[in-house]
Amino acid sequence: MKLIAVIEDRGGLMFNHRRVSKDRILVSRVEALTEGHRLWIHAYSADLFPNATVDENFLCNAEEDDFCFVEDCSVRKYENRVQEVFLFHWNRRYPADVFFDLPMDRFSLVHTEEFIGYSHEKITLETWK
């Protein structure tokens, strides 16, 4: 599977049961990235991606070439199933109490791109394989 996450400077995803931030241009970028593929999400993310497959067990049920958008759960126990990781960085420090916990030591950074978001002057996308 291919993971997508949006993190703040320390790897934070959520704070007090809410995503640390959101940006509509970033959401459009995720939709373009996953176009033609299945995007799996947890119910919490349904307001961002109304056309995605919502499943409480999405990380278990996703297949090899499927994308999983992760923002409110641990991914560590699925690390052997992950082929590629797309990390969007807010390039800001937000309060966080849920963190992206995939060990990245077996992945290599293959691409970095910066773009201007709607509410963020710089968002960085990293592609890891």
Image (tube, grey):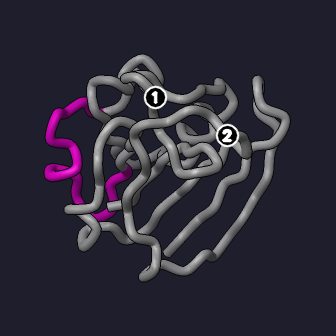
- Asked if the magenta segment contains residue 61, the reply would be yes
Q: Name the residue under label 1.
A: 15
- Residue at 84% over, 35% down: 121
Q: Name the image quarter holding residue 91.
A: top right
Distance between mark 2 and mark 1 Cα atoms: 12 Å
Q: Name the residue under label 2.
A: 93
Q: Dividing the image into 4 quarters, which one contains the N terminus?
A: bottom left
Q: Which of 16 and 106 is in front in this view?
A: 16
Q: Nearer the viewer, residue 32 or 111?
A: 111
- Residue at 61% over, 49% down: 88
- Where residue 112 appears, as percent x and y from the top left, is 72, 64
Looking at the image, is 71 positioned above or below residue 63? above
Q: What stretch is highlighted in magenta?
A: 53-67
Residues packed near mark 1 inside 10 Å, few (<14), some (14 to 19) or many (20 plus)? some
* Residue type at the position of mark 2: Arg
- Where residue 66 appears, as percent x and y from the top left, is 33, 54
Q: Nearer the viewer, residue 75 or 28?
A: 75
- Left or right, 29 with respect to 124, comes to left
Looking at the image, is 21 positioned above or below residue 111? above
- Residue at 15% over, 52% down: 60
- Asked if the magenta segment contains residue 49, the reply would be no
Q: Name the image quarter holding residue 103.
A: bottom left
The secondary element bearing badge 1 is classed as strand
